[in-house]
Amino acid sequence: MQFIFPNFLWALLLLAIPIIIHLFYFRRFKKVYFTNVRFLKEVKDETSNRSKLRNFLVLLSRLLALAALVFAFAQPYLADKKINQKQDNYISLFVDNSYSMRALSEDVPLIDKAKSTARDIISAFSETDQFQIVTHNLSSKQQRWTNKEDALLLVDEIELTPEVNKLSNVLSRQSNLINTVDGNNSIYMLSDFQKVITDLPANLDTNLNVQLMPFQSVQENNISIDSVWLNSPVAIKNQSNPLVVKISNYGNENKKDIRLFVKENGQTKPVGTFNIDANSSVIDTVDMVFTQDGWQNIEVQIEDYPILFDDAYLLSLNINDNVKILSLNEGGGNKYVTALMSGLANFNLTNQSTSNVQYNKFAENDLIILNDLNTLSSGLATELENYILAGGKVLVFPGSNAAKETYNAFFSKMASNAISEYSNEEREVFTINAREFIFANVYERIDKNLKLPVTQGNYKFSNFTSRGGETLLNYRDGSPYLQKYVKGKGILYVCASPLNENNSDLVRIAEVFVPMIYKMALSSGETKPISYTIGNDNLVETNNVSLGSESIYKIQGSQEFIPGQTKVGNKTIIDFNDMIAEAGYYDLSVNDTIVDRFAFNYDRTESKLDFLNVQNLKDEYSSSYEIYEDFLKADISQMISDRDKGKSLWRLFLILALVFLALETLLLRFWNV
């Protein structure tokens, strides 16, 4: 047993006073004469013995009462063997501030109860102790020690966040700082302990003292829009664009007549209602027809109270109706192609000679056409390779007198099939792959009346299935006329025949050539995300734009800031640095011109409100962790004090003092001598 105020023990010397009084107390006796004292002597002896016994018991009661009172003032305690009372205390507190902590418990949000408990824990320690306050944000300022006053201020500043981290990551952050100091350490984790994030290590470092404090809500039902995606690689104007919606019911009750809405550019349109069974998911499809080009803000919504953070899903689509095409020619451009494109308002064709290629302008084009080139220089091949790998699209029409070795060297780098000898044999294109994006949803039906190209000369391809090519147009004998290869983030298209009208009538068949070129320009080897998740997608890619010396990227939305930016080839990596805290649309702009748009959604990790209760935590973690139970109804400060300073005994000694005083009173009142 140890004492917080051992100097009070000097008061035990006061016990000598009642002892001295007892020993030197002499009562005066008056003589009374009797005729016969034989019986009186017996009574005198009996009364004297009873008086001595009562006086001794009264003295003992007084001594014990006074001693117990002195001990109570000295505040004795039984010290924890793990705690070194001579060392400093370092306390790390994690307060779960994810959106699931918005749930109610007795009409009070869990986050408010957690913050109140955190304040009580801090108050239980002294002014000289050091504290670390950690939340799901895991910001850099949380990786340091602070004093008691600042720790209380940090707790007051805690707000709900869309960011969600596994508890193992949180504990790792806490233990990393704990391991930098030498002293008594305590780690507190205040959370609702959802199963999806509770992955604490079963075997804990014996040097760590970790306490789990679970907060339980009364609401455990939730319906969430888990994800939304396009059914096609890109959205196209004035066509049906199927939007697929996945909705999950995480509760134990069947839900009926859930209303689904779609908000398109600020206009809300009801889609309908649906039923969803308990603990199951449904997938629905919404047909979207975009009648204007440019950025489209799409928001899919449901109604589900009170958990609201996952009831809306945001998408951002760019309908590009201005197609930029670069045609590389050895002589002049193809007159039919030029005439055809000039008649289409949304096509911008640029003809350029291979002798004067502007490689730095490649990234500005949606599609590059190699028009009947007989030689493919190594420099051009390298630039085309970089362009494709970075997300560009290249359509190759080899010349009839092509130097096959230059083409095949390029095809080898692209891992595509090589071309062999040129043949002047007339051949008919017989089948069209209407399942692939290029020709999907182009024709109401495909029948014998659809005119397909006829070629007077063509190359044959090697047939290595490992190359992974996909055939878009086939000759009657099944050999490919047009093939597609996805490489890196871009696409390579290779045609078996030259483009000029002497070898093929493709350019004269507008119902095939126009949608083919248009959708090739819109296609993508790696589809650009139409939505992002806060906390998970801190790094995103965007195409480079021409920047002046003073021009920088800016993010504009519910927040406005300058992101990190790193140029990599013809792409720029945008680093949001955890600055996005609210779901919404964020524009990337340069010189007040919007160059990209990002739709950010809240993380759905905590949509499933499935928690570990106290018994679950005990079953899984009691061997290495201390788990608090019913702590909300107790004196947290006293519980912490008992744990970190030892078991306090002053209340026990105060009670004993009162008991001994009461015993003395009973002896004096009811024991008559």
Image (cartoon, rainbow, N blue to C red):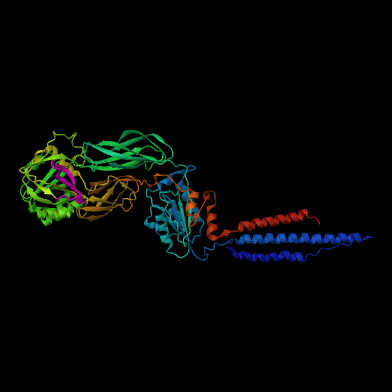
| For residue 553, side relative to residue 128 (left or right) | left
Residue 477 colored in magenta in the image: yes
Residue 456 rendering spot, x and y as whole percentages: 6, 43
> Considering depth in this image, is 475 or 571 the residue closer to the camera?
475
Give residue 254's quadrant in the image: top left
Q: Furthest residue to the right?
A: 35
Residue 157 rendering spot, x and y as whole percentages: 42, 51
Q: Which residue is painted at 33% across and 40% down in the image? A: 246
Q: Which residue is painted at 44% across and 64% down in the image? A: 181
Give residue 231's quadrant in the image: top left
On the rendered image, what quadrant is the N terminus found in? bottom right
Q: Is residue 551 visible?
A: no
> Considering depth in this image, is 498 or 540 the residue closer to the camera?
498
Task: Examine the rendered structure and indicate whether residue 315 appears above or below residue 81.
Answer: above
Q: Number of marks in the image?
A: 0
Give residue 25's quadrant in the image: bottom right
Q: Is residue 528 visible?
A: yes
Residue 294 rendering spot, x and y as whole percentages: 22, 41
On the rendered image, what quadrant is the C terminus found in? bottom right
Task: Examine the rendered structure and indicate whether residue 232 appears above or below residue 82.
Answer: above
Give the extent of the magenta segment.
462-487
Residue 209 colored in magenta in the image: no
Residue 408 rendering spot, x and y as whole percentages: 12, 54
| For residue 599, side relative to residue 255 (left or right) | left
